[in-house]
Amino acid sequence: MPDSLTLEVANLIVDVLTGIYSEETGRPQPLKISIVAEMRPATHYGADTPLAASKNYMDLKFAAREALPPGLHFTLIEAVADHICETLLLQDERVAAVTVKIVKLAIAENGEKIGITLRRERR
């Protein structure tokens, strides 16, 4: 099995214009977004290895927050996840795959976790 490096950012709360029901459209709703980026790692990481030898996990936060087009309504949360995946795959050729999990907080009751998980591999 080849070496791998996984970067993770979990449980970001991001307000996104999304949904199909009248009570969802027209205003942002909170989504809980977790992202896993599978990387091709360097052959070795020493104490003085620079950040350029890996990927800044802040890039994952950026893809979930700032990279989503402001004012754009995503009908499906699958489209939100797809946009995040594509952003990370385009940013860095070392990213082999991205998994995005989204939970819709506005419709959850009694601790439910209603949402999707999308995984995209580099093609």
Image (cartoon, rainbow, N blue to C red):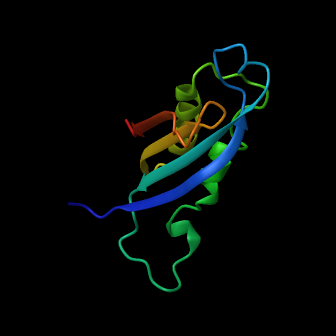
Q: Quadrant of residue 10?
A: bottom right
User: Residue at point 73% right, 18% down?
Assistant: 23
Depicted 87 relative to depicted 52: above or below? above
**Where does the image place residue 62, in percent across and percent down from the top left?**
67, 49
Q: Residue at x 54, y 61 (%)?
A: 55
* Image quadrant occupied by the C terminus: top left
Judged left or right of residue 43, residue 55 is right
Q: Residue furthest bottom?
A: 47
Residue placed farthest to the left in the image?
Answer: 1
Q: Position of residue 120 (x, y in %)?
A: 41, 37
- Above/below status of 76 relative to 115: above
Pick the front one: 34 or 55: 34
Dividing the picture into quadrants, the one containing residue 59 is bottom right
- Nearest the eye: 13 or 122: 13
The answer to whether residue 94 is visible is no
Location of residue 98 with respect to 104 vertically, above or below: below
- Return the x and y of residue 51 as percentages of the image width and height: 57, 70
Camera-nearest residue between 79 and 33: 33
* Residue 32 in picture, x, y percent from top left: 61, 44
In the rendered image, the residue lying farthest to the front is: 110
Taking the spot 79% from the left edge, 25% from the top edge, the residue there is: 27
Say whether residue 98 is left or right of residue 70: left
Q: How many marks?
A: 0
Residue 58 visible in the shown view? yes
Q: Quadrant of the N terminus?
A: bottom left
The residue positioned 58% from the left and 60% from the top of the image is 57
Residue 40 vertical position relative to residue 28 in the rendered view, above or below: below
